[in-house]
Amino acid sequence: MKFTNRTGIKVLVVVVGVGAAGIVADWHLAASPSPVNSTKADSPPRVEVVRPRRTTVAQRLQTNATLEAFEETDLFAKVSGYLSDVRVDIGDHVKAGQVLAVIDVPEMKQELAEARAQLESKRSSLESARRQLDHNKADLALQNALAKDREQLGQGRGFISDRTLDQVHANADIAKADLGVAEANRDLAASQVDVAAATVEKIKTLLAYTQIVAPFDGVVARRQVNRGDLVQAATATRATPSAGSLFTVQRIDTIRVFCDVPESDVPHLHVGDPAIVRPSGFDGKPFIGKVTRFSLRLDPETRNMRTEIDLPNPGERLYPGTYAVVLLEMNQRPDALTVPSVAVGSDGDGNFVYTITDNRITRLAVKTGLTDNGRIEVIEGLSEETPVVASTKGVPPLRTAVQPQTVRENS
């Protein structure tokens, strides 16, 4: 037992001694500087830099849009009657002037026959008035000639009495008056002919309205009647513009894309600005167009301005009523000097970038413009040769010595 205890004590002392030696060794190692660490501490930190480059930037706006037909019209009946024929259905392509439906109005045909007969009667009256006028002109000429002869016979010879001369002059005056009446009758008959002819043309025009025709080349979008339906003359109002319409025809060879531009972006909007239209159901496939026109007024309720983009639609793949997303590129600048957006900082003194001068961090004030696709336009303060620190985050303090390392940006 005593041997064991002594042995245990000796062992314990040895272990403690070894531990103390370890602590001393560690202290000496910590106190002695490592050659490797000393080299790293003396080396300036590496800083990634980029070169400004020129690219196209634009102010982009993504907004919702709706596709509409380039032209759309509701066709109404001008006269009342029964539809005797309906020649088209929805989806049918029609040409301008093509007859879509026919309204039967038999009483109007009878009115036309009566008006034509009345016109012929008035024309006959006019012809009689003209013949009477010619007769009166001849009679006046005869009476004037007789009066002249009687005056010559009576001058200085006394062959003709004054009473006879007075009678001759009276006959001439009567003939002149009859001529005036004949001219008035002729003018009246001519006016009656004009009225009768206008009545005939009016009824013919109304009869032409019995044929519903397409106003332009397009597609029948709605058909709301059938043969035998009784249709009334147009009853549309401002509140119900399509009430009572027979057909709706749309022109879709060109599609209008309508979107709304917010008030803050309106000053940058111009006709001809590029537009990318992504209609719903096309798996994101874009259609490229340009701003065609805008309303030049803001909706007082939404403070948006209605803007239109026209898209050619020769294959009729685009349909009116389709929802779409539009990306407008406004205020496009094709040769702008840009740097990454993260390379530009801002504080109370304005916008700035960090650059490297004599391998030391320096600050450079800049004036910026548009931001687009992760890049920001620099209007003033930079040249294409100025190295710019790639990010303002984690930059060493100003005047710190650094090792610039140029990185290549993705295009």
Image: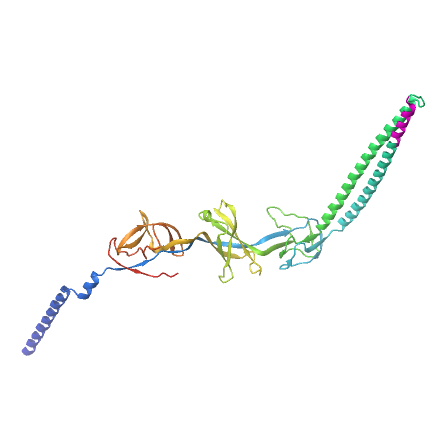
Question: What is the tally of numbered marks visible in this picture?
Answer: 0
Residue 80 relative to residue 305: left or right: right
Residue 337 relative to residue 168: left or right: left
Q: Position of residue 118 (x, y in %)?
A: 80, 44
Q: Residue at x 59, y 52 (%)?
A: 71
Q: Position of residue 175 (x, y in %)?
A: 86, 31
Residue 281 relative to residue 242: left or right: left
Q: Nearer the viewer, residue 219 or 289?
A: 289
Please tell me in which quadrant of the rendered image residue 410 appears.
Answer: bottom left
Q: Position of residue 46 (x, y in %)?
A: 27, 60
Q: Nearer the viewer, residue 326 or 410?
A: 410
Q: Which residues are magenta?
A: 142-155
The answer to if 341 sits in the magenta stretch is: no
* Residue 181 in the image: above or below residue 237: above
Q: Quadrant of the N terminus?
A: bottom left
Please tell me in which quadrant of the rendered image residue 43 appears.
Answer: bottom left
Q: Nearer the viewer, residue 106 or 212?
A: 212
Q: Main secondary structure of the magenta part?
A: helix
Q: Position of residue 350 (x, y in %)?
A: 33, 48
Q: Residue at x 49, y 50 (%)?
A: 260
Q: Residue furthest front?
A: 156
Q: Residue furthest right?
A: 159
